[in-house]
Image: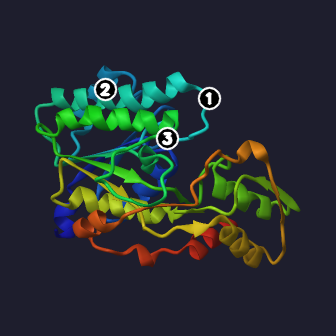
Amino acid sequence: MKMVELSKKKVFITGISGFTGIHLEKHLINEGFDVYGSTLAQADNPKHLSCNILNEQDLFETLRFVKPDYIIHLAAVSFVASENMQNIYNVNIFGTLNLLEAIERLNYIPDKILIASSGAVYGNREGELDESMCPQPVNHYGNSKLVMENMIRSYFDRQNIVITRPFNYTGVGQESHFLVPKIVSHFKENKSEIALGNIDVYREFNDVSFVVECYEKLIKSDVKSEIVNVCSGSAINIKEIISVLEGLSRRKISVTINPKFVRKNEIQTLCGSRKKLNSIIGDFHRNYDIENTLSKMFNH
């Protein structure tokens, strides 16, 4: 697709002012898209529109105004340990339902609707997880995303939808209650010790820039009515993250294990299969590595 043609394409991002939305907006603008988005708060940017996804009419009027070629749905409660269970289900399920119903009322079909689910739908299972597996979520966040996925399927025959299951990712701007930013902040603040859970496990910790590039390539692809992992398939040990940061900061940190942070029956290794993703958009995960990601976060 030529850049001249692409520059005419409008993208609408729900949750544009969130962690992923900020990175995605910047990436898509650099790729020549005309980017709009929804935010709960009033914003100075005229393309950031105040809109509550729990209000279907609000969404309909916003989408009717923008009339986007592509819609990327990021707005969600994404913190697994969130204590407000009702809010998790309201936002993640009914917010998505409101979006799809608002789209149905428009007199056109967007080129692509990308809806972000989560690798959390798989639950705690050993090894490489692929899209053919039966989901087994173990928390309200993962369960809310699975219910959302099941609900979305009924729109597959009427809309051009792709559901993504991103695995753990991080980067500059992620809130400090998430694991990697928490570790980085301890090094930046010259703290001598940190309390963590089980540090012997292996997990994916991808760069948010990798995730947003995947999203961009997926909306431009021909894929629809599919669920796709967004993952690198590379799991690393939390000790390795600490080791990289010790190298960057040139000092050691003492790790204490807080029993409150240790999950029962913790899975040793958990990562996604990237085979389906690669078959659609190619394999470029090696362009991103954890050392570079941590360096950007530490030096920001």
Task: Looking at the image, tell me whether mark 3 or mark 1 is earlier in sequence order.
Answer: 3
Residue 20 drawn above or below residue 286: above
Asked if residue 42 lies left or right of residue 253, the reply is: left
Report how far apart the C-alphas of labels 1 and 2 lie in the structure.
23 Å
**Residue at the disc numbered 3:** 44
Residue pictured at 37% horizontal, 42% vertical: 37
**Could you classify mark 2 by the number of other residues whose Cα lies within 10 Å: few (under 14), some (14-19), or many (20 or more)?**
many
Q: Quadrant of residue 145?
A: top left
Image location of residue 51, percent across then percent down: 40, 29
Relative image position of residue 57 (x, y in whole percent): 30, 21
Q: Does dot 1 land on a helix, a strand or a loop?
A: loop
Specify the label residue 122 is tagged with: none
Q: Nearer the viewer, residue 210 or 157?
A: 157
Name the side, left or right, on which 150 lies relative to 288: left
Task: Find the residue positioned furthest to the right.
Answer: 192
Tell me the number on the disc at residue 98. 2
- Type of amino acid at the residue the image marks with label 3: Asp
